[in-house]
Image: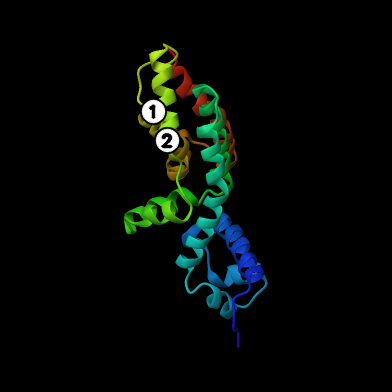
Amino acid sequence: MIKTKDATTESLILEAANKVFQRKGMDGARMQVIADEAGINKAMLHYYFRSKQQLFEAVFKKTFASFAPQIIKILNEDSPIEDKIRSFTFNHISFIIQHPYLPNFIFQELNRNTEFILIIKEEIGLPNLDKFKKQVQKEVEEGVLKPIKGEQLFINILALNIFPFLTGPLIKAVVDIDDINYNKLLEERKTEVANFIINSIKA
């Protein structure tokens, strides 16, 4: 009988689950497939994680925790807003391309459990926008940027970064492209989003 949970085994499970979720998404992933990927039996997997939902939440927390410091660093750097937009957009979209299941999961969780974001804030931490908002205001006052609030600018960036990942099938149908060209389009957005936003706010 298993007496304690082993950190190495748990880490192995999370890595395996991350790979399966990337390939299959939340709905398509199966616990047996994750167990096979990790090289353990299903009973062992259920000992560590009672359900796929619990496992998915653990994968999300670990994955987001690895990216959160990058976001915080970019927003708190002493660099112009234009540079922050380019850096944030490139890194954010690159991260989502590597973990395409995350946007849908976040939205589903926010709709299912309104306290989900509070859990993330307490356990992992969310970026503080105070410096970013003050910097935007300063560059607006200096005539570098057109009048815009920092929070509105940040929401615009998030929306343009995330939208294609939430509506992939729709975009592919409307634009009439296959998966290969859709992936190329996502790669292009690493710079296209930043160019669009910067051109729209530069004075």
First in residue order: circle 1 vs circle 2:
2
Label 1 to label 2, Cα distance in Å? Answer: 8 Å
Relative side of 199 to 147, left or right: right
* Residue at (38% x, 56% y) in the render: 116
**Secondary structure of residue under mark 2:** loop
Residue 20 position, x and y percent, is: 58, 60
Asked if residue 167 is positioned above or below residue 198 in the image, the reply reads below
The residue beneath circle 1 is 150
Q: Is residue 74 visible?
A: yes
Residue nearest the viewer, comparing 8 with 21: 8
Q: Which amino acid does label 2 sit on?
A: Leu
Q: Are the residues flagged by discs 1 and 2 in contact, CB closer than 8 Å?
A: yes
- Residue 129: image tag: 2
Q: Can residue 92 be seen in this view?
A: no
* Residue at (43% x, 17% y) in the render: 139
Rendered image quadrant of residue 32:
bottom right
Q: Image quadrant for the C terminus?
A: top left
**Figure disc tally:** 2
* Residue at (55% x, 26% y) in the render: 78
**Secondary structure of residue under mark 1:** helix
* Residue at (60% x, 40% y) in the render: 180
Asked if residue 164 is positioned above or below residue 38 in the image, the reply reads above
Farthest residue to the bottom: give it. 1
Residue 39 position, x and y percent, is: 67, 72
Q: What residue type is labelled 1?
A: Gly
Residue nearest the viewer, comparing 107 with 2: 2
